Amino acid sequence: MKKTSLILITLTIFFCNYAFPQNYSIVIKGGHVIDAKNNIDAVMDVAIDNGKISLVAKNINAAKASQVVNAEGMYVTPGLIDIHTHVFWGTEPNHQYENGNLAIQPDGFTFSNGVTTVVDAGSSGWRTFPTFKAQTIDVSQTRVLAFLNIVGEGMRGGYEQNKNDMDSKMSAQVARQYKDIIVGFKLAHYEGYDWAPLDMAVQAGNLAGGIPVMVDFGGSQPPLSIEELFLNHLRPGDIFTHCFAQLGSREFIIDTTTKKVKPFVWEASKKGIIFDVGYGGISFAYSQAIPAIKDGFYPNSISTDLHVGSMNAAMKSFLTTASKFLAMGIDLKTVITQSTWNPAREINHEELGNLSVGSGADVAILSIRKGKFGLFDYTGYKLVTDKKLECEMTIRDGRIVYDLNGIANPVMAPLLPIAVTTTNTTSNFYDWYNEIQSGNDLKLTPHKSINQAEFFREYRKNSSWWDKAFIFLKTKDLAQLTPGVYVIDSGNVIATVSQGPAKKMEEVKWEAHRNFNDLQYIIKGKALMGLASVADTRAALAIPYSNTTDNMNFTNEGGEYFGADASTFFIFSPLEMHRPVIKVPENEDVKKIVIKVRVP
């Protein structure tokens, strides 16, 4: 009887995995999976669908996957997390890391390193965070979280010494308002010989619900005691960044006479103080890191302190930094843990840094390049190593955003061959739309071209985004909205109002998107809207898809054209290309709103 039951179980598993293969968007085959949360360190396959991890197992059948990634000989890990960066980039003169030119735009430097989440380390304060959010966080494909500077203005060079602009209550209030984004507070570069700014940051952490503080002392003479810092001021879970710095103005963790970790540092570690690398420009020295590692003292998390100066100096990149710890003798599994699960826990975002089934599909695929490499620090000390980490692929939110060598098959995700429905439209969408109460008395009619099946498919997955988009459309006084960007739901629903002359048909390209739907409405004036399926055989790709702009362009001699005015609105999904707002003879000036709604 037991033998019969075992056979039935075996057959059930076989047929579930092979006879009836699941549809997946991506299946990663044959890679060595390292996932510290789930204690996985073995060759496994990973399946992804709808932006989520669907399955991690051996021998997943990829017969119906849209893309298959051959990761044999590579390492498959959760998306890497860099908790010390400076990405509040801008053009304000003498603002340094706060809306200035020493910070960097995240997407250009994350995905090529397998990094899917960065935490800005105090570039903005409670006064400037809304600008940072609108300017960088809301428009980045990289997930951007933040430590809020205890200084209201943020990291503006000498301004960081201004204790009059340090405010625990206002900082905590802003952190509570943006609790999904702000992960803690930062004290940065303070040079005074007192603990008051740090204590204010800790107080803000307590007021905001017990979130951590990251501390980076600028230095003082004589140096402040880090023993007092660790044992009398910081709480368990607070973060000491630049932990391997050796500068005259700061006390360091290694006794340079004995080459041993100072006893109180071990005590602080047991207390729960987090030691973070925060490499930076001059905040990492092998003279501290090598003795510490030989003494068995490992950092809790690897981070870069990414900014214009550090990336062009010894630090270079996240994977160069991680490679240095491999070269110093830390094993790969530990380095990956220090780059994924550990930082996720440090910032209290345990939904990140793992490959659990149902979690968001942020994945890095890494290889180890063999050769001869010189990894040096800012003092000029160099380690020569025969291996270096390299990113082969990065997947963010279930989409391939970086593929170094085209290991996905097909390289580009196929576009579904679903034709546009422009006739025989039922009243389902119309009836649904009209149930939303209007607050601006606009009697808009959904255009007959709207693909109802695709709309309701997406709506079932995340109705809140569409609800917010239509509430904005039906309640705002659109005619009085000034041109500009209106963030409705950060990163998910964004409206843009524009006004100006419509372009001639030959000046308007066919375009299509992958991450966002376009809801387009002509507030004032008249125009033509072109519409075609992305699978239209008459279309040819003119400009390839860009992850940065979520856009690709086509030429197409076909398609259909519809009149657009203030009586109706359109929705263009990723299944459709469109040629928007084409000039009509009787009309010059057009005011329009485009509401972008993320594809779930």
Image (tube, rainbow, N blue to C red):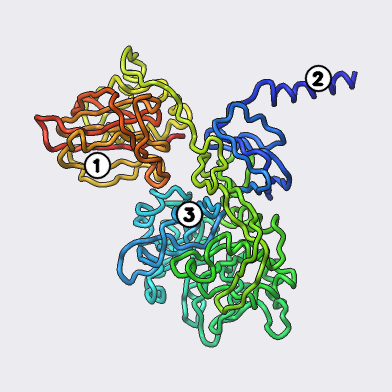
Image coordinates of residue 356 in percent, x first then y, are 64, 41
Q: Is residue 276 left or right of residue 499?
A: right
**For the view shown, which residue lies furthest in the left direction?**
586
Image coordinates of residue 128 in percent, x first then y, are 36, 61
Secondary structure type for disc 1 = strand
Depth check: give the residue in front, 433 or 536. Answer: 536
Residue tagged 2: 8
Residue tagged 3: 145
Disc number for residue 497: 1
Image coordinates of residue 113 in percent, x first then y, are 54, 55
Image coordinates of residue 372 in percent, x first then y, are 64, 65
Q: Is residue 171 left or right of residue 266?
A: left
- Labels 2, 1: front one: 2
Q: Mark 3 Cα within 10 Å, few/some/many (few <14, many 20+)? A: many
Q: Residue at x 46, y 32 (%)?
A: 462
359, above or below 170, in the image: above
Q: Quadrant of residue 564?
A: top left
Secondary structure type for disc 3 = strand
**For the view shown, which residue lies furthest in the top direction?**
424
Three-letter code, disc 1: Val
Three-letter code, disc 3: Leu
In 3D space, how far apart are the residues under numbered discs 2 and 1 (Cα atoms)? 61 Å
Q: Quadrant of residue 58?
A: top right
Q: Mark 1 Cα within 10 Å, few/some/many (few <14, many 20+)? A: some
Q: Residue at x 74, y 69 (%)?
A: 296
Query: Badges 1 and 3: C-beta atoms under 8 Å apart?
Result: no
